[in-house]
């Protein structure tokens, strides 16, 4: 079974509007971390935002926020006021065993392509 | 400060040759990770280091792959007797400590002809 599922096809959003990128995950751990990375055409993976499984508040970083619904096992990324530079591939990732180094590897979803229209 | 750097940025090699890929982590980061990104497999974990030791080698696809880290800094991923299916982008990441946020380098695009 997939650990991280990103099923949306290519997404399009108008500049200055908000967009939500979906991510669901599967784990039996109680302690885990969820990440979103952005990969523009240049290829570099850029860290955007992190949510720990025990964090009660949804994470926010500037225009990025994470809509964390633990019971549904979803961690959707919300980008507000989209900019042309937001056009990229977006990956959701999970690190199981939140505070234990032994499992600190990241498991990634397949990614979602976002295109921002002027 | 400087981010994670990787070299070379591109490598084209012939099937059967050995290649070495280098990663320079962010200064002060004790943990270092290698991932591979290919069209068919997506992003997959290969190996990580805490200091100079690699507690988890489970992601290495075959015994042709090996990695080492020296001085708690630079890491080298070596692929022996390269095969066409090794063609991919090899990404390196580092984190301050195990369990901390991982920051990625620009990757090395490997093409095996």
Image: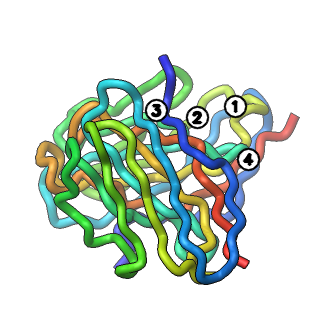
The chain identifier of the residue carrying mark 2 reads A
Mark toward the start of the polypeptide (4 vs 2): 4
Question: Residue A81: x percent and y percent?
Answer: 67, 26
Using the image, determine if residue A85 lies above or below residue A25: above
In this rendering, which labeled residue sits more in front, label 4 or label 2?
4
| Residue that appears at 34% across and 55% down | A106
Mark toward the start of the polypeptide (3 vs 1): 3
Q: CA distance from mark 1 to mark 2?
A: 6 Å
The chain identifier of the residue carrying mark 4 reads A
Residue under label 4, please give it.
Answer: A41
Disc 3 and disc 1 on one polypeptide chain: yes
Using the image, determine if residue B1 lies above or below residue A89: above
Answer whether labels 3 and 1 touch (C-beta < 8 Å): no
Question: Residue B85: x percent and y percent?
Answer: 59, 81
Q: CA distance from mark 4 to mark 1?
A: 17 Å
Disc 4 and disc 3 on one polypeptide chain: yes
Answer whether labels 1 and 2 touch (C-beta < 8 Å): yes
Using the image, determine if residue A37 lies above or below residue A23: above
| Residue that appears at 65% across and 58% down | B109
For the view shown, which residue lies furthest in the right direction? Answer: A118
Q: CA distance from mark 2 to mark 3?
A: 7 Å
Residue under label 1, please give it.
Answer: A82
The image quadrant that residue B110 belongs to is bottom right
Q: Which mark is residue A79?
A: 2
Answer whether labels 4 and 1 touch (C-beta < 8 Å): no
Q: Which mark is residue A65?
A: 3
């Amino acid at each position: 079974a997939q650990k991280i599922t990103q099923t949306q096809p290519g997404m399009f959003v108008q500049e200055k509007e908000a967009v939500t990128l979906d991510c669901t995950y599967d784990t039996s751990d109680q302690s885990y971390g969820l990440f979103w990375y952005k990969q523009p055409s240049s290829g570099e993976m850029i860290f955007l935002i992190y949510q720990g499984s025990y964090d009660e508040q949804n994470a926010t970083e500037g225009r990025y926020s994470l809509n964390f619904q633990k019971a549904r096992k979803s961690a959707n990324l919300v980008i507000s006021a989209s900019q042309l530079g937001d056009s990229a591939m977006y990956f959701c990732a999970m690190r199981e065993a939140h505070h234990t180094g032994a499992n600190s590897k990241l498991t990634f979803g397949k990614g979602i392509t976002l295109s921002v229209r002027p | 400060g400087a981010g994670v750097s990787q070299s070379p940025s591109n490598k084209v090699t012939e099937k059967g040759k050995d290649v070495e890929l280098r990663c320079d982590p962010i200064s002060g980061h004790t943990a270092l990770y290698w991932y591979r990104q290919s069209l068919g497999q997506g992003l997959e974990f290969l190996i990580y280091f805490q200091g100079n030791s690699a507690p988890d080698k489970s992601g290495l696809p075959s015994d042709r792959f090996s990695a080492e880290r020296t001085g708690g800094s630079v890491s080298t991923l070596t692929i022996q007797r390269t095969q066409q299916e090794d063609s991919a982008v090899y990404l390196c990441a580092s984190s301050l400590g195990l369990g901390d946020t991982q920051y990625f380098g620009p990757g090395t695009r490997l093409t095996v002809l």
